[in-house]
Image: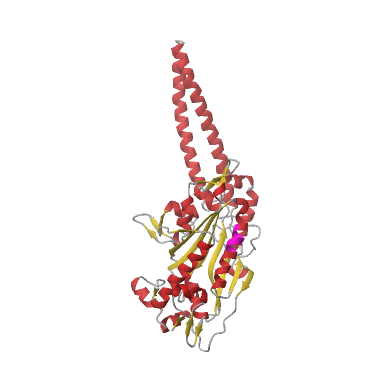
Amino acid sequence: MLTLKYITENTQDVIQRLSKKHFDGESIINEVVALDNLRKSTQMLLDNSSAEMNNLSKEIGVLFKQGKQAEAAAAKEKTTHLKESIKAYDEQLTDIEQKLTNLLVQVPNLPHASVPAGKHAEDNLIERAGGKMPLLPQGAMPHWDLAKKYDLIDFELGVKISGAGFPVYKGKCARLQRALINFFLDNAREAGYLEIQPPYVVNAASGYGTGQLPDKEGQMYHCQIDDLYLIPTAEVPVTNIYRDVILNENDLPIKNTAYSACFRREAGSYGKDVRGLNRLHQFDKVEIVQIQHPDKSYDTLTEMVAYVQTLVEKLELPWRILRLCAGDMSFTSALTFDFEVYSAAQERWLEVSSVSNFESYQANRLKCRFKGNDKKTQLAHTLNGSAMALPRIVAALLENNQTPEGIRIPAALIPYTGFDLID
């Protein structure tokens, strides 16, 4: 979340930048400022009463020693009233701070200056593109038909077992899934990321730490009895490793990667976007996360985007990178680049990765800090990216590589699959 210090010192700038994200922040930001002023005045009253209480306590002892019983009794009576005031101020302060927190978690991150204006995906800017568009044979099929032809994915069986959006992968497609996971993890490790195997459920504190709660609560699967949430991405447990942690500047950047299954309710999704593997409730993904010094986080974002580009290039997929407009960005992001690959049989671009800099927004919620060489403690910056999400990668690989003989496997994956053709 945004820091109180930044909001109170840059109130109008905050309101203006939030409006770029199409968030009407004037009312809530002004309420935050008013509550912060009340917090400061209440804290002052509490501090003054506590100081007066301490002074009186010392004075009472002296008066008793001097035999001034009446004056000591009067001073003691005054401390009784002060104790009641201190308790009241303390309760008021707790209430104010809770109200402030409740407001602050509703305020999205501020967009970086380079974020383009816009409301919808159509307003995103294409940064660059690459890869060769495939020339498909006559009678080319979308991946859901290929899955049936080669007995690769059983969508109906997934409905029977769980429901729509939970496919069952079979045979060579199950092996392709496992191959992609290992391929992405090996590439991340070679790029300097430490592999983590995180839990697939998190507590509410973790959800709040990375910003999924309360903003995306309706999109998360909630285990109510235990008050745990199925993770929507490995970003959540991995970033929360550093919740309430003070790092050393010399340890930065911290680079982690993790494979996990991901669970998303995707409430409200419908139409062609949900056909086949296009949108699922459960899917596999390899995530990369970095904790970085604020002065270096945007260089790191550039590095992470370049790294994800190498993955789609190795998979021989047509790709493009989008700089998301303010209206299409996530609640927590300051700047996001999306990767899309071209699905030739569907004749459409499919998002397969988002790489984002959250600046100090998540770190403030997490209390993820570092101590600099000057011994001062400050908030770190957090970044993460999909490297990569599997379903739409699999969809594009199946569609773009179909031939009359079968589905060709890209050369980079053959050592992982153990086969070069699905037939």
Residue 312 part of the magenta-drawn span = no
Q: Residue sitting at 58 percent across and 75 percent down?
A: 318
* Dominant secondary structure (helix, strand or loop) of the stretch shown in magenta: helix
Residue 313: which quarter of the image? bottom right
Q: Residue sitting at 45 percent across and 71 percent down?
A: 179
Q: Nearer the viewer, residue 345 or 189?
A: 189
**Magenta region:** 300-305
- On screen, 114 above or below 183? above
In percent of width and height, residue 388 lies at 51, 67
In percent of width and height, residue 218 lies at 44, 61
Residue 302 part of the magenta-drawn span = yes
- In the drawing, does residue 27 fall left or right of residue 267? right
Q: Nearer the viewer, residue 28 or 128?
A: 128
Locate the C terminus and report the quarter of the image it occupies: bottom left
Q: Residue sitting at 48 percent across and 64 percent down?
A: 185
- In the drawing, does residue 91 fall left or right of residue 108? left
The answer to whether one can see residue 166 in this image is yes
In percent of width and height, residue 246 lies at 51, 45
- On screen, 378 above or below 172? above
The answer to whether one can see residue 269 in this image is no
